[in-house]
Image: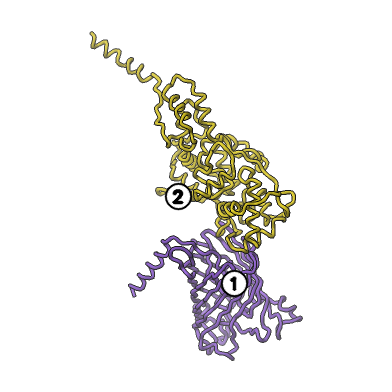
């Protein structure tokens, strides 16, 4: 085991020392739609983010009565991310929460281990690891049957990790895989605390400013077979890069924004027209 | 008696010996400092001679500020000067013209490309201490009265750049003297002046003979490099869609794009607006020449961009001395060809 670790260390150090041209902008933002992207912030960059998910566009809960979901806010995110170094980004955000846990404080720690590069010793992919911690600050319920009974404080906590592996195939196409593990300290009866999932994300850059982004996360868990009422979160969006600002308009069946929400608690189905409009605004500042 | 006389006269002899004006000796070779040579010929010291008595003064600190903007040197921390730029974002620190006595943007572009240097809007800091005037010409139109104290004072010029161009903080006394100390290590050397043999010999003869009037030797040396960088603002072409009417050279346009534009814009090095070698970048630029916004190459090349909130720095413009009309036409031709 020690030899394996030493080999990996030497491999990573060796790759960093050889002359390489790093591939830039695999994705334009640190998020795709629901999933994180492999990108981290530059040192001393602060990213202010606002995210929003409206109500169902169509379906039983959408349409004209809710003005196609625009009158409903399924989830809202306000947050910051900061580039501690060119490899390490920390994040803190508050989301409303669309699942049974609400008023979520989300913390992230994101570290870029590998950077896709060309040159003497090319690196075919970029690899980033992401640690997630979410704490629900919602009021404790007196009903022991509800998930927010919070018999212990630890029941408010959801945590997990992701490995983001991406490759920029050309200036117009990037692809990313996201194996994840999310652990919820308290779950509804019959559910599993831990959920493994595999995400995939892609960016198709149509022009310098506009890009098409798609992501999906498939829970690989015994508690998520077909028919249980849980569905794969799938999003499609348009990304607009104005230099300094990245705007995103998307459609997704996921109601939650944070990983603690959309991975375990997506119960909306594209097939039943239960998808919604969402947007994200990201603005980078130099500090 | 004789011995007493000698002992009595000894102090007088010593006094006379030391008070005789000694000729300053200086070794004349390619690496001889031009300023040392000028001073040896009797040129008065400039007002930007370093005050090395300042507490904490360090050339190493000056180097860190110029090249990194912040850092730690021998246990001393240097606070970040600007969130947006460092000096070397806009200024080289090596010679960037083959002939220092002329303003020739094309010769400069060729020289920078051949030597693997970026081609920048700001004049190189190499030889800055040899110049006597700063923020020249049309920079008064841009900075108004701010230019007045900086025009003939290198210290004030550095501070003006630190605050206005870099949108950072003023340097404290120690930092300023340290930067100045570092700039003095970048003063011109004799090899930079491309002296002819007879000119070299003339300088040498003046150095050896203190009785000569050295005015002509000083003038000869000063004629070999510009005492200031001229700066004239140029408007974009009147018809932005048609351009300036010159036929562009694709190779030269490529050279300009790669050595100049990409220095700041590649990988968002100093700008949030990324440019690269992709067709998308060229299509974007090509479609916007005719606009009157910062999306137009004509607009930003000739007028620059204003500071934006959150990123208060900006794109400096290319003066006529830094980008000729032909180079602008070359750049457009290259962008058009890559966008097809």
Q: Residue at x 53, y 84 (%)?
A: A187
- Which chain is depicted yellow? B
- Report the chain holding disc 1: A
The tag on residue B219 is none
Image position of A100 (left or right of B192):
right
**Of B192 and A90, which appears nearest the observer?**
B192
Label 2 – label 1 distance at C-alpha: 42 Å
Q: Is residue B305 visible?
A: no
Answer above or below: position of A163 versus B317. below
Q: Whole-percent x and y of residue B119?
A: 56, 49
Query: Which image quadrant is residue A66 in?
Result: bottom right
The residue that disc 1 covers is A203
Q: In front: mark 2 or mark 1?
A: 1
- Report the chain holding disc 2: B
Q: How many marks?
A: 2
**Of B39 and A66, which appears nearest the observer?**
B39
Answer above or below: position of A60 versus B182. below
Q: Do the residues at pointers 2 and 1 share their chain?
A: no
* Colour of chain A in the image: purple
Query: Which image quadrant is residue A233 in?
Result: bottom right
The residue that disc 2 covers is B77
């Amino acid at each position: 085991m020690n030899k394996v670790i030493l080999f990996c260390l030497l491999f990573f150090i060796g790759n960093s020392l050889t002359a390489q041209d790093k591939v830039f902008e695999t994705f334009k933002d640190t998020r795709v739609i629901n999933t994180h992207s492999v990108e981290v912030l530059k040192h001393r960059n602060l990213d202010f983010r606002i995210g929003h998910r409206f109500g169902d566009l169509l379906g039983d809960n959408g349409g004209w009565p809710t003005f196609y979901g625009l009158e409903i806010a399924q989830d809202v995110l306000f947050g910051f991310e900061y580039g501690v170094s060119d490899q390490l980004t920390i994040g803190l955000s508050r989301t409303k929460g669309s699942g049974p846990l609400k008023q979520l404080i989300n913390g992230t720690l994101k570290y870029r281990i590998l950077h896709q590069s060309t040159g003497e010793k090319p690196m075919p992919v970029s690899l980033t690891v992401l640690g997630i911690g979410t704490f629900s600050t919602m009021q404790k319920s007196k009903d022991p049957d509800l998930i927010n009974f919070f018999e212990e404080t630890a029941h408010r906590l959801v945590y997990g990790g992701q490995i983001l592996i991406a490759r920029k195939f050309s200036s117009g196409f990037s692809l990313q895989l996201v194996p994840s593990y999310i652990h919820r300290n308290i779950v509804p009866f019959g559910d599993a605390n831990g959920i493994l999932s595999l995400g995939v994300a892609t960016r198709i850059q149509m022009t310098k400013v506009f890009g098409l982004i798609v992501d999906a996360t498939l829970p690989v868990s015994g508690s998520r077979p077909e028919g249980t009422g849980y569905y794969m979160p799938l999003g499609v969006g348009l990304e607009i890069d104005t230099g300094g600002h990245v705007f995103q308009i998307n459609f997704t069946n996921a109601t939650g924004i944070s990983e603690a929400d959309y991975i375990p608690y997506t119960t909306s189905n594209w097939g039943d027209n239960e998808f919604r409009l969402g947007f994200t605004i990201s603005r980078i500042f130099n500090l | 008696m004789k011995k007493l006389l000698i002992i009595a006269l000894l102090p007088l002899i010593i006094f006379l010996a030391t008070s005789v004006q000694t000729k300053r000796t200086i070794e004349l070779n390619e690496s001889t400092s031009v300023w040392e040579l000028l001073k040896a010929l009797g040129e008065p010291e400039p007002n930007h001679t370093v005050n090395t008595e300042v507490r904490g003064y360090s050339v190493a600190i000056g180097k860190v500020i110029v090249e990194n903007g912040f850092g730690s040197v021998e246990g001393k921390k240097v606070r970040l000067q600007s969130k947006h730029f460092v000096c070397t974002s806009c200024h080289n620190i090596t010679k960037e013209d083959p002939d220092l006595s002329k303003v020739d943007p094309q010769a400069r572009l060729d020289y920078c490309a051949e030597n693997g240097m970026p081609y920048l809007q700001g004049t190189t800091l190499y030889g800055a201490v040899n110049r006597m005037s700063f923020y020249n010409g049309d920079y008064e139109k841009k900075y108004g009265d701010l230019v007045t104290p900086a025009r003939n004072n290198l210290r004030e010029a550095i501070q003006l750049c630190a605050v206005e161009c870099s949108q950072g903080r003023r340097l404290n006394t120690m930092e300023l003297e340290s930067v100045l100390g570092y700039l003095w290590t970048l003063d011109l050397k004799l090899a930079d002046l491309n002296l002819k043999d007879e000119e070299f010999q003339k300088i040498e003869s003046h150095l050896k003979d203190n009785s000569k009037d050295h005015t002509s030797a000083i003038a000869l040396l000063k004629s070999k490099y510009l005492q200031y960088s001229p700066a004239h603002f140029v408007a974009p072409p009147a018809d932005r869609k048609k351009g300036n009417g010159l036929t562009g050279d694709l190779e030269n346009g490529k050279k300009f794009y790669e050595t100049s534009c990409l220095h700041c814009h590649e990988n968002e090095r100093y700008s949030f607006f990324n440019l690269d070698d992709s067709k998308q970048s060229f299509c974007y630029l090509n479609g916007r020449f005719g606009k009157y916004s910062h999306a137009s190459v004509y607009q930003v090349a000739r007028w620059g961009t204003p500071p934006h909130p959150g990123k208060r720095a900006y794109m400096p413009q290319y003066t006529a001395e830094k980008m000729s009309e032909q180079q602008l036409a070359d750049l457009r031709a290259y962008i058009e060809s890559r966008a097809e």
